Image (spheres, grey):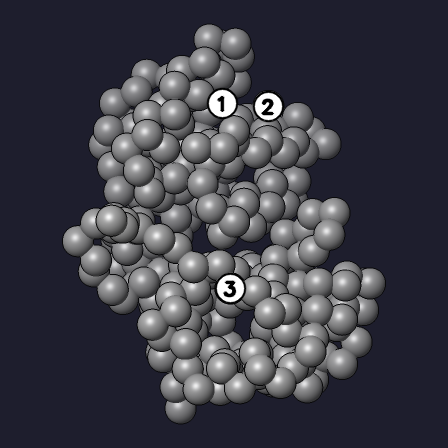
Amino acid sequence: MEAPLVAETEAGTRVVTFGCRLNAYESEQIRARAEADGVTGAIVFNTCAVTGEAVRQARQAIRKARRENPNARIVVTGCAAQIDPAGFAAMDEIDLVLGNAEKAAPGALLPQPELGRVRVNDIMSVRETAAHLSDGLRDRARAYVEIQNGCDHRCTFCIIPYGRGNSRSAPAGEIVTRIGRLAAEGWNEVVLTGVDLTSWGADLPGQPTLGQLVARILKLVPGLPRLRLSSIDAAEIDPDLMRVLATETRLVPYLHLSLQAGD
């Protein structure tokens, strides 16, 4: 596992991120929410559950943070917290356990004793993408935009659907508007990210495809120099996506394919 990413608000709240780019994107939402809500002196761990090692590292980091910051308010969220809230609640070091659906909601990081120490709802009941999506996670070279969350597959080796819930897509209009704003700010590259990117649109009216979305973005945001896709399932590449990959020079000819096992 890579070392966790750490971001800090002006008021001194730290957000520690384990795992994927989507987690990093959502940690930016958590940081922005902490700023907006005036949260001070907290440490928020956005955890990953893709492997047992990822969970072990998160627990280890939480214990270390408590030793080094005995007076800090420690909040744990992310996929590991969503899947095993009781396990994290049993750790004396932790003040609050938040589910994935709750982690960037207004006021979620503030002390609210009346709501209890564990606030984790049934992720399978979530039917919409979060209304508080930010304009994107930025690094030095590119910006990231979440277009989809969750997964409808139930692969025997993968626990992620139980941390992320079923697949749900952001509306195309919202995505185009967000990317248009980033292009206007001068970003040269935008990366589309999600849990199961090629399932985008299956839950929307008319069931548009990822390829149709990509074509729409490139058409309606002519000022964007480059568009890139994050990790996708190659078996689900639709004909429209194949066409734009072959014909659109502004779509980066790069695919990140996950290999789970081999011989």
Q: Residues within 10 Å of mark 2 (few under 14, many from 20)?
A: some
Q: CA distance from mark 1 to mark 2?
A: 7 Å
Residue 14 percent across, percent down from the top left? 59, 29
Up-down relation of residue 206 to residue 195 (above or below): below
Front tag of 2 and 3: 3
Up-down relation of residue 162 to residue 108 (above or below): below
The amino acid pointed to by label 1 is: Arg
Sequence-wise first label, 1 or 2: 2
The amino acid pointed to by label 3 is: Leu
Q: Are marks 1 and 3 in contact (CB under 8 Å)?
A: no
Q: Residues within 10 Å of mark 1 (few under 14, many from 20)?
A: many
Q: What is the residue that sits farthest to the front in this orientation?
A: 263
Residue 167 percent across, percent down from the top left? 34, 67
Q: Which mark is residue 73?
A: 1
Secondary structure under the numbered disc 3 in the rendered image? loop
The amino acid pointed to by label 2 is: Gly
Up-down relation of residue 213 to residue 93 (above or below): below
Secondary structure under the numbered disc 2 in the rendered image? loop
Sequence-wise first label, 2 or 3: 2
Mark 3 = which residue?
255
Q: Which mark is residue 41?
A: 2
Q: Quadrant of residue 117?
A: top left
Front tag of 1 and 3: 3
